Image: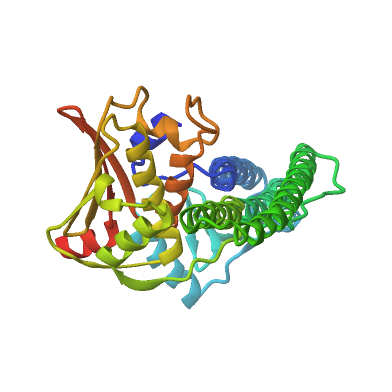
Amino acid sequence: MKSLRRLFPSLHVDSLRAKIQLIFGIAILLLILLFTVLLQSSVSRSAAALEMQERANIHYLYLYYLKTGKIDTDYLASQNIKIVDAGARQLKMSKIIAKEGEKKNFDIVNVNLHRYILINNDRFKLILENLNRPRFPLELFIAFAGAFSLLVILYFWMIRSIQPLSELKSQIIRFSQGDLDIHCHSDRRDEIAEVANAFDRAVATIRDLLRSRQLLLRAIMHELKTPIAKGRLVSEMVPDPKQRKRFHAIFERLNLLIDEFAKVEQITSKKFQPDFHSYKASDILEGSIDLLMLEDPSRHIHTVIRQDFTLRGDFELLTLAIKNLIDNGIKYSPDHHVDLLVQPRQIQISNRGEPLSQPIEHYFTPFHNSRHGLGLGLYIIKNIIDIHRMELRYRHENGVNTFTIVDRETEAGNSE
């Protein structure tokens, strides 16, 4: 295959269908080449045999003329050879034959699909027309037609055999896009059907697991809502206003977390439809800080808006992602302080601390090894960033961790 690509750089045979087309194309070309060679060989042998027969006939005529002094017309008729009529036609034929070359004792000329024999010896001169024709290789044509038809039938049979692969591919694409209601069961008995049936069983298992997970999460969140609501009612009976306010904040925080869990479940199950609108980066930062529900945000967060900009996105999702980044920065920083910077097409979240022990891609997987939680923080953030077609970058310099959210589409538009 590599040698074929070196010979034909523009040849693309990556797909199975293209490989089958290439194989059958080469087979048909070889069959046509073989047929052409055999046909030329058969025609040449038939013409040579006819010429040998003509020489034998002329030799017999000469010997017969020596014995009897006349032409054996009955013999010529038995050999399907006739004498060309004398007169103008014979003169015309003599001129045509003379043009073919020098004067010869014996010559054969094909004129207008007729085969003429010129005899010019010391005894007689004759122009004969051989009504015989070179033998047509009918068997060869039948063999070629049969082989060609067989190759065509085999080609369409192979193409039809791999047709389920295209259907399976479309089902896999739908599944990768979050559509779990797909079915690719096949009643065929080949290997492709085995793969399709195995995938169908895997999809059914995954669908059942996801639905079980969704039911469990929804049941848990529903059950948590009730004690939270009761807790808020009981907190109203606390006489101390300061304590009552703290209880309100705690229950509000719990209620907010449950709503976030519900949204995260929708995002990870690929069934969430974001509501995109244009927002100022400063407004998104303000909404993220509000979600933290800090008593004194200025003690932990310092914001610098070097140049505000507008981006398109889902406000709730973006504020949730940035809130998680800020929350992690405060939690893991020795001084519990985070610096926010807004500049053209970028939002930076920086905090002092040790660098990540693994490449950042390691933390994009769910339930990675984490000493302080379930290992879902950056996984959720990365999913939200991908939904918005943005980019999350990380660097560590001079003891400072910096996470940068880059609006790639707008950045690419500006560069153009």
Above/below status of 409 relative to 268: below
Classify residue 11 as left or right of residue 156.
left
Q: Nearer the viewer, residue 156 or 341?
A: 341
Report the residue at 54% width, 71% height from top. 86
Q: Nearer the viewer, residue 309 or 103?
A: 309
Q: Is residue 127 visible?
A: no
Q: Nearer the viewer, residue 128 or 231?
A: 231
Q: How is the image coloured?
A: rainbow
Q: Quadrant of the C terminus?
A: bottom left
The location of residue 214, given as percent across then percent down, is: 71, 51
Q: State the residue lying farthest toward the bottom.
A: 88
Classify residue 236 as left or right of residue 389.
right
The location of residue 202, given as percent across then percent down, is: 75, 40
Report the residue at 61% width, 60% height from top. 271
The location of residue 251, given as percent across then percent down, is: 57, 54
Report the residue at 48% width, 57% height from top. 245
Classify residue 337 as left or right of residue 88.
left
The location of residue 8, given as percent across then percent down, is: 36, 41
Q: Is residue 321 visible?
A: yes
Q: Quadrant of residue 85?
A: bottom right
